[in-house]
Image (cartoon, rainbow, N blue to C red):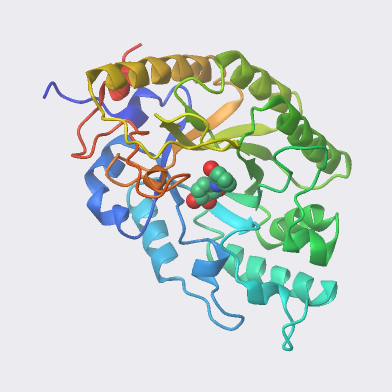
Amino acid sequence: YRNIPSLSERYRPYFRIGAAVNAKSLNTHRDLLVTHFNSVTAENEMKWEEIHPEQDRYEFAKADALVNFAREHGMFVRGHTLVWHNQTPAAVFLDDLGQTATAAVVERRLEEHVATVLGRYHNDIGCWDVVNEAVVDAGTGFLRDSRWLQTLGDDYIAKAFRIAHQAAPDALLFYNDYNETKPDKSERIYKLVAGLLDEGVPIHGIGMQGHWMLDDPALDEIERAIDRYASLGVRLHITELDVSVYGNVHGTGGQSQEVLPYDDELAKRLAKRYRSLFSLLRARKDVIESVTFWGVADDDTWRDNFPVRGRKDWPLLFDVNHGPKQAFWSVVEF
Ligand SMILES: Oc1ccccc1CN[C@@H]1C=C[C@@H](O)[C@H](O)[C@H]1O
């Protein structure tokens, strides 16, 4: 190999370079992590169902391991995530009889969860995705009809940010979402965050997940969304970047089961797409503080199972053997 430059060193003048890690990849991808990344996010280990699986049981071991690894290597830690409609135990919203719990009970549980988790890591975690994916994807609605909305009502989002700020006054607090560049949805995200800011809610940033594809979203759509969010005066993080080689990964419509072989033609298409994405992101370095990939290398990506279980994808900068792909070189050579 020609000697491989460090991705995070190359981008030090621009923004932090992060990766989602899990209990396994912390070990299996350790070399790539320490060489190329200066920020980490727990892929699952800080989600409610993992870190607080039962009312009176917390499981901190895996989150502790991640935080210790990050401290050892001087890496920033993004906390992910506190209030989300997925990967949250059903019991959080139920009373002892299995009926829907009252707002007071759910709010107390949220306060206890946030105080416990943010309290434990207040010296280690610099920012939190406080609320994840709270607005509807399509149609004319606004807030997603989640158990959080059903039990706590419309102001659960403001409540969550205030509770988080109370628990960790120094942490930067983010709203995080996907399909975040789609015009209709980005207007809903903008409206939500603008409203929170108008209410004086402590919110400091927007997380753009960045689960993108080879041809969608178009660069100008991404640029418009970045500029719209930046006009609120908040920081922007790209929080879950990957570039699926399949189309239509979030939208409705058919998903082919057919696996695309990662051949030279596909490698070139992916490299070209990553080159243009990072050219735009570098041009917006004044508002983009961090770019985190949702994974490290193609041998461990959630895209192999979403939206189609078992369909191999090739969305990241390092290949299944942890070598640099053409896409890696298109990101570091500019
Ligand atoms: O791509 C999606 C499609 C449908 C719903 C949510 C998403 C994105 N949702 C993300 C993806 C993976 C999870 O590990 C993250 O926590 C979540 O934020």
Residue ID at (78%, 77%): 101
Specify the quadrant of the image occupied by residue 205. top right
Residue with the most extreme left position: 1
Vertical placement of residue 274 versus 153, above or below: above
Residue 189 showing in the rendered view: yes
Q: Position of residue 67 (x, y in %)?
A: 42, 58
Q: Nearer the viewer, residue 31 or 228?
A: 228
Vertical placement of residue 199 versus 187, above or below: below
Q: How many marks?
A: 0
Specify the quadrant of the image occupied by residue 206. top right
Q: Position of residue 168 (x, y in %)?
A: 65, 58
Residue ID at (51%, 33%): 290
Vertical placement of residue 49 versus 156, above or below: below
Residue with the most extreme bottom position: 97
Residue with the most extreme top position: 334
Residue 171 showing in the rendered view: no
Q: Nearer the viewer, residue 243 or 254?
A: 254
Left or right, residue 124 beside residue 119: left
- Which image quadrant: the C terminus? top left
Q: Position of residue 321 (x, y in %)?
A: 18, 39
Residue ID at (56%, 17%): 218
- Which image quadrant: the N terminus? top left
Q: Nearer the viewer, residue 334 or 103?
A: 103
Specify the quadrant of the image occupied by residue 141. top right
